[in-house]
Every structure is written in structure tokens, then in C-alpha cells.
Image (cartoon, rainbow, N blue to C red):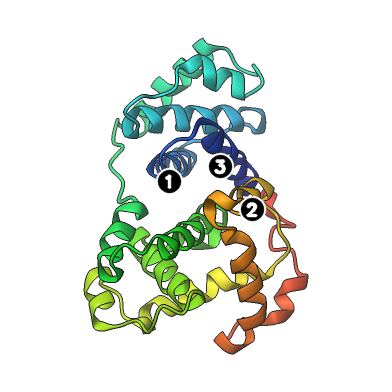
Amino acid sequence: MRGILVDWLVEVHTRFRLLPETLFLSVNIVDRFLTNKIVMLDKLELVGVTAMFIAAKYEEVFSPHVQYFRHVADDGFTEEEILRAERFILATLEYNLSYPNPMNFLRRISKADQYDFQTRTFAKYLMEISLLDHRFLEYLPSHVSAAAMYMARMMLHRGPWCANLVHFSDYTEEQVLPVFRLMIDYLIRPVKHQAFFKKYASKKFMKASLHARDWAKKNAKAHGVDPDMATRDLYQDEDAY
């Protein structure tokens, strides 16, 4: 269920044309809140839309008005309900919205390859996988960012993981491999998150989702990932999360 909610948040985020940081913070708020509170299924969408409302206020120069968030939820909640949920979520989190956003780490690592636009676009796609797949929750944002850059550079033949990249990422090649393999594992499985897949299948994002999946299926075995995983749906019991 978490993956379905985050996939919907990706769609909302795309519709509002918000910053990447806003999406990452939104999901972080959802995860931290659900760690502390039990939420009924029919209120999960309210938690998601309110989390993005809060994150937009924190990250954006011009945040969308609450009425737009009400509308994007098909008027399933009133503006007052969203504002009440905002106060409750912030109180639960003790108004602490500090978060080591993966985008900040990606920008730092990008210094090592002269901010190559294509590499960074592919790395953004790979980083966002960590939002949808609960298995990435055990890894630090900096670790996910390093693995995303590592994989993006490998896909685009940008050279080895050199000392300069180790310096700016603070992770060696050996350290990024577990997260790298987890990304491949996600990519070779059936598409489960349609909004996320379609977003990065567009020309704007250089069809990153199409290229990444094609590359992963061709190279999974060479990197120690069981290609038979391609026939298995990881999220058939997703309601447990």
C-alpha cells in the first residue's frame, strides 16, 4: 500500500511541477508519521496529500494553495481537514522537518563529473526508486545517491568509479554495490508503479525508465542479480507495508 501511495504522490508532484526535493521530503514525512501513528486505510491519502502540502511550503518558493491539494485528491477531503491534518502531522513530528535530502548529495557527487546533465537525469530516476521500494529504507540517503550515480555512469559508459567520485560521494565502489544490485532487482521486475514509470519514460527525462529497464534486464546476471526475478511481482503482498 505504501508503494501505491508514493506512486500517486509522484503523479501529484509531476502535475504541480514541484522541485525534486519536495517529493523526497514528502515521502520522508509520510514514513516518519506512519512510524509514530496508526492510520486507517481511508485516511492514508489524506496523510500523503498533507505531507506534500507541508513539504511544498518548506521547499518551494511559491507553494500551491491548499485548494489545489484538495482538488487533486478529487475533493475527498475539505480544506479544513487538510489544514487540521497539517497541524497534527507537524505536532507528531515535533515540527522537525530536517532531512538529509538525497538531491543534495547528488549535487555534490555531480561535481566529480562536471555536472553531466544526462548522467544526473538518469541518477534522479534511480534515486526515486528508493521512494517506492520499501527495501531501500535501511540505506542512508547519501548511500542511495552514490549508488544511483554509480549505476547511471555505468549505463552511460562514463568511466570507472574513480578516486574523485569516492571523495565527493564518500563511498567506495564496494560500498555502493549492495544498493546498486537492489536497483537492478527493482528494474528487472514487472512495472508496478505506472505514474513513476511514465514520468521518466517521457522525452523530458530522456526516457530514463525505458533505458534503465532495458539495461538492467541485459546486465542483471553479470552483476550478480538473479534474472529469474524478472517474472516475480515483489509487491504482491504489498499491503503488509
Query: Disc 1 marks which residue?
Result: 24
- Amino acid type, callout 2: Phe
Query: Percent position (x, y) of residue 140?
Result: 36, 61
The alpha-carbon separation of the residues under discs 3 and 1 comes to 10 Å
Q: Quadrant of residue 192?
A: bottom right
Query: Disc 2 marks which residue?
Result: 197
The alpha-carbon separation of the residues under discs 2 and 3 comes to 10 Å
- Amino acid type, callout 1: Phe
Q: Quadrant of residue 175?
A: bottom left
Query: Percent position (x, y) of residue 163?
Result: 24, 82
Task: Find numbered disc 3 in the image and state the secondary structure of the residue it sits on.
Answer: helix
Instruction: Please say if 197 is above or below 217.
Output: above
The residue lying furthest to the bottom in this view is 222
Q: Quadrant of residue 167?
A: bottom left
Q: For the point 47% across and 73% down, which residue is it? A: 151
Q: For the point 43% across and 46% down, which residue is it? A: 24
Task: Find numbered disc 1 in the image and state the secondary structure of the residue it sits on.
Answer: helix
State which quarter of the image contains the N terminus. top right
> Does any portion of residue 218 appear in the rendered image?
yes
- Amino acid type, callout 3: Val
> Could you tell which of marks 2 and 3 lies nearer the N-terminus?
3
Residue 190 placement, left or right of 99: right
> Does any portion of residue 38 appear in the rendered image?
no
Query: Disc 3 marks which residue?
Result: 10
Residue 65 placement, left or right of 208: left
> Could you tell which of marks 3 and 1 lies nearer the N-terminus?
3
